[in-house]
Amino acid sequence: MSATEVTNSRISYESFAIKPPLHPTYDLKGIIKLALAEDAGDRGDITCMATIPFDMEVEAYFLAKEDGIVAGIALAEMIFNEVDPSLKVEWSKKDGDFVHKGLQFGKVYGRAHNIVVAERVVLNFMQRMSGIATLTKAMANAASPAYILETRKTAPCLRLLDKWAVCTLNHFLAFINDYLFIFLHIQYTQKAFVDFLLQVLIGGGRNHRMGLFDMVMIKDNHISTAGGVTNALKAVDLYLEKNNLQLEVEVETRTLEEVEEVLHYASQTKTSVTRIMLDNMVVPLPNGDVDISMLKDAVRLVNGRFETEASGNVTIDTVHKIGQSGVTYISSGSLTHSVKALDISLKIDTELALKVGRRTGRA
């Protein structure tokens, strides 16, 4: 197959759809039901029952009221289906796409009563997820060539959704069509191919561990109670071997001496350590800038023997400089713990609604 033939071929959006992150016990449908029940209480939507004929059918449209990356579209469909499987939903955008202020990017058709019942739950999830996706995209672009990660600092019971938003698909299919031939003619490793897709298709964000169960992360409190970095590493290696577990292991370091201690341990012992966290080695300066000299020294010490992760004092203003230090990853709790929701509304398509929208500059 020639490069031209590959370029002219079409790749389905659906083949690259980003699914929710895996979790062994998370009940996504249960979360949807809980959110709907929270809103409905023991009486249901009394305002709808009073004002909207039950059999009245309408069309409502999703309106972006500011620029950003949309996320939560797949979840919105699940919510509408839970409320009323007969509702029909259409989208002109997909999760991970950019939307501009004033854009109508989706429609839902069906019983007005059920659309309004689902409205707030749908928007609450979509606005939060879109806010996370928008900030992630901005920080990922600034952090390059380092990868941006979220943390476990998520809203209780919404962790899977928060992390889903971080890795929302961004469709650059024209770019893929232009360069897919590379992978047909050059032998790439699986990791190289995955890295390429992450850079091209996703907004740049990657998921850190989902919870306490899927990765070993030796943090300051573990180190303190274990009696030091070396003791903590020994205990983890022994535990994993005894229980026949193969998991990624990350250890937090706060000083260059602790980095050297990890490296010394690894040089003397077969260890499961895969990543070293360089915590708070980005030092804020009075002028608002940051000093990354300690971080760069730590990266030089590691010298590619392990993945590295910068943590602490990461903001949209500092992440670019941190990304130039040579670290593999940059983790930021602000992606999820301080999210600014993207303003989105759902409007029933009436002439009055359109007039109000035009008057307020939102249509």
Image (tube, grey):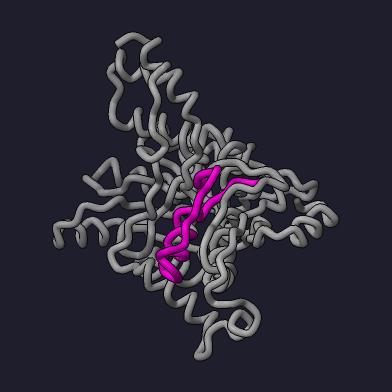
- Identify the residue at image location x=76%, y=47%: 288
- Side of 313 relative to 75 (left or right): right
Q: Magenta segment, which residues?
A: 68-95
Q: In this orientation, which residue lies closer to the viewer: 51 or 41?
A: 51
- Identify the residue at image location x=49%, y=35%: 171
Could one spot residue 330 in this view of the protein? no
Residue 44, image x and y in percent? 53, 85
- Side of 353 relative to 31 (left or right): right
Q: In this orientation, which residue lies closer to the viewer: 310 or 48?
A: 48
- Identify the residue at image location x=63%, y=52%: 313
| 36 shown above or below 293 | below
Residue 26, image x and y in percent? 34, 67
Whether residue 81 appears in magenta in the rendering, the answer is yes
**What quarter of the picture does the N terminus occupy?**
top left
Residue 265, image x and y in percent? 31, 47
Could one spot residue 191 in this view of the protein? yes
Q: In this orientation, which residue lies closer to the viewer: 243 or 198?
A: 198
Residue 248, image x and y in percent? 30, 50
- Identify the residue at image location x=60%, y=86%: 46
The residue furthest bottom is 42
Whether residue 41 appears in magenta in the rendering, the answer is no
How many numbered discs sit on the rendered protein?
A: 0
The residue furthest right is 359
- Side of 179 relative to 358 (left or right): left
| 168 shown above or below 81 | above
| Image quadrant where residue 196 sits | top left
| 324 shown above or below 341 | above
